[in-house]
Amino acid sequence: MKKNYFLGKNLLILLTGSLIATSCMTDTESPVIQDDQVEIALEETGGTGDENLRKGGFMPYEDTFYNSITPTFGIDGLYFPGTGTGKARGLGKSYSFLNQRLSEDGTLLLGAPVKDYYTQELNDFGIDSETLDDKVSTVVINERGHALFIESEENELIRDIVNPDIIYFNAKINIVGGTKIYKDAAGSGTVNGWFDESSNEGVSKVSATIKLK
């Protein structure tokens, strides 16, 4: 247990997620979450509502979220549930709920059922958490109830050599449905960004291609 806890702390970057892709940084360039930086990233995401959705065809999807997570011990290991606020293309201002878990060997973060930790929150947004598939590790939703369901694969993790509290991550994702405009949506993409172990906060960015049925 001590070994897994240690590894879990070192891998505390799950976001799911999720964070802005960055190259190697100097000590003066290490990520610091500031309101103006987050606002710039959100503006670059574009999209303020349901416009530009092409039913029956492929469409690009992007989102940027400012995330906060809470490491939690579950019955079968260490989990990393979290929430985020940001902006998503086609959805405008949105919220995210996510969950990941530490692998048995303590070397990877894997997508875990988001409904295990956010049943009430999802229900409040009109999503029936009981029918939500276990493979859905992230839900992105706006105030109008349009939601996108995301499955996250294995996270690739890289710790910053200058500031070891900063961890970068990159993972493949799959779009596995949603609600309203994203009902039966399918697609794939990537999530990347960074996470600060000292504050349990970070930024994530998703880029994907979606087909609306």
Image (spheres, grey):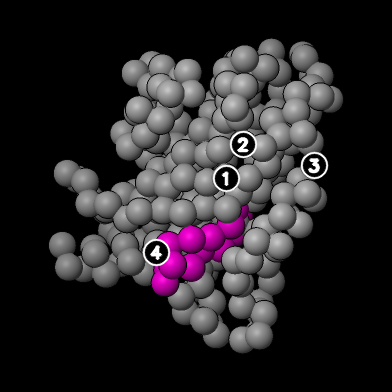
Mark in front: 1 vs 3? 1
The nearer-to-camera label among 4 and 2 is 2
Along the polypeptide, which appears first: circle 4 or circle 2?
A: 4
Say what amino acid the circle numbered 4 marks: Leu
Q: Quadrant of the C terminus?
A: top right
User: For the residues marked 4 and 1, what is the alpha-carbon distance in whole angstroms?
Assistant: 22 Å
In space, the residues marked 4 and 3 are separated at their CA atoms by: 31 Å
Where residue 104 appears, as percent x and y from the top left, is: 26, 53
- Residue found at x 69% / y 30%: 91
What residue is shown with label 4?
11
Q: Which residues are magenta?
A: 192-204
Q: Name which residue type carries label 3.
A: Gly
Lower position in the chain sequence, tag 2 or tag 1:
1
Q: Secondary structure at mark 1?
A: strand
Give the structural element (helix, strand or loop) at label 2.
strand
Q: What's the distance in space between the residues labelled 4 and 2, CA to CA?
A: 26 Å
Look at label 2 and name its amino acid: Ser
What whole-number distance in Å separates the C-alpha atoms at marks 1 and 3? 15 Å
Q: Quadrant of the N terminus?
A: bottom left
Identify the mark nearer the N-term, 4 or 1: 4
Q: Earlier in the sequence, mark 3 or mark 2?
A: 3
Q: Which residue is mark 2?
A: 94
Which labelled disc corresponds to residue 46?
3
Left or right: where does residue 82 sit relative to residue 88?
left
Q: Which residue is mark 1?
A: 85
Coordinates of residue 62 in the picture (x, y in percent): 71, 41
